[in-house]
Image (cartoon, rainbow, N blue to C red):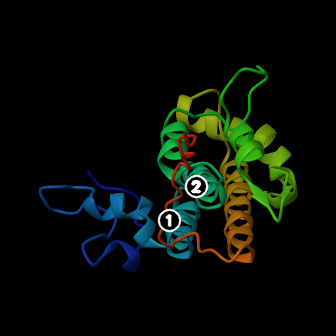
């Protein structure tokens, strides 16, 4: 299967030249794109290259990059034990919802991300969060679900919103003294000692 000519993407290795690699695991180089070790900035460069040649694919990559970065930020800066927070994130798929009882990433952010004893609103960190929720998410839905026609211009603009939001989250993590690409520090559940008799 051939893909549009994207030139040489050094981040994906010498075998990526607009075609699937010839190996037993055809997308092995691409799946590395979503690993922590691949790197936030390197991932963004690959997405920008895709965006220049195939805006719809670039938009989908940018959307995944934003969500991946948001989840990673919650894991790094959250206050709950890492294991239970990771399990909760595994069950959370929406950024926002009209239903109060729905589990959302923005709800987890509100509950988990406390900096210097203060809650920090997600909209203060991601300055164009409402545009992501209202414009970019609709473009993403059109691309993924085939809901209407998506112009290249709209795909690029929406992808830029996602990439800017991911970059702002990465910068926020750095300001807190952590690294979005760094190893997670395990937070363990605190068990109280049984009462002395």
Residue 27, horizontal then vertical, whole percent: 27, 56
Decide if residue 177 is on the left or right side of residue 64: right
Residue at (63%, 59%) from the top-left corner? 73
Kindly identify the residue that appears in the image at 40 percent across and 65 percent down: 5
Relative image position of residue 185 (x, y in whole percent) = 51, 66
User: Disc 1 on helix, strand or loop?
Assistant: loop
Residue holding disc 1: 184
Q: Determine whether, in the image, residue 172 is placed left or right of residue 29.
A: right
Q: CA distance from mark 1 to mark 2?
A: 8 Å
- Quick check: marks 1 and 2 in contact, CB under 8 Å? yes
Is 106 displayed left or right of 196 in the figure? right
The residue that mark 2 highlights is: 75
* Residue at (43% x, 59% y) in the render: 34
Crowding at mark 2 (Cα within 10 Å: few <14, some 14-19, many 20+): many
Give how far across and how far down residue 167 sits, in percent. Answer: 69, 68
Residue located farthest toward the left when viewing the structure as drawn: 24
Foreground residue among 175 and 79: 79
User: Going by the image, does 15 lie left or right of 95?
Assistant: left
């Amino acid at each position: 299967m051939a893909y549009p000519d994207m030139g040489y993407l050094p981040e994906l290795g010498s075998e990526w030249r607009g075609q699937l690699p010839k190996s037993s695991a055809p997308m092995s180089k691409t799946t590395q794109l979503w690993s922590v070790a691949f790197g936030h900035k390197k991932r963004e460069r690959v997405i920008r290259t895709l965006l220049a040649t195939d805006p719809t694919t670039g938009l989908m990559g940018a959307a995944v990059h934003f969500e991946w970065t948001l989840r990673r930020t919650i894991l790094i800066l959250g206050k709950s034990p890492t294991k239970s927070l990771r399990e909760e994130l595994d069950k959370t798929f929406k950024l926002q919802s009209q239903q109060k009882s729905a589990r959302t990433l923005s709800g987890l952010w509100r509950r988990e991300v406390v900096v210097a004893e203060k809650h920090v609103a997600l909209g203060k960190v991601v300055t164009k969060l409402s545009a992501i929720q209202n414009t970019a998410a609709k473009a993403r839905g059109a691309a993924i679900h085939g809901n209407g026609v998506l112009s290249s211009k709209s795909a690029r603009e929406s992808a830029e919103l996602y990439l800017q939001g991911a970059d702002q989250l990465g910068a926020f993590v750095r300001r807190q003294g952590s690294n979005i690409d760094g190893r997670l520090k395990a937070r363990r559940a605190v068990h109280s000692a049984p009462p002395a008799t």
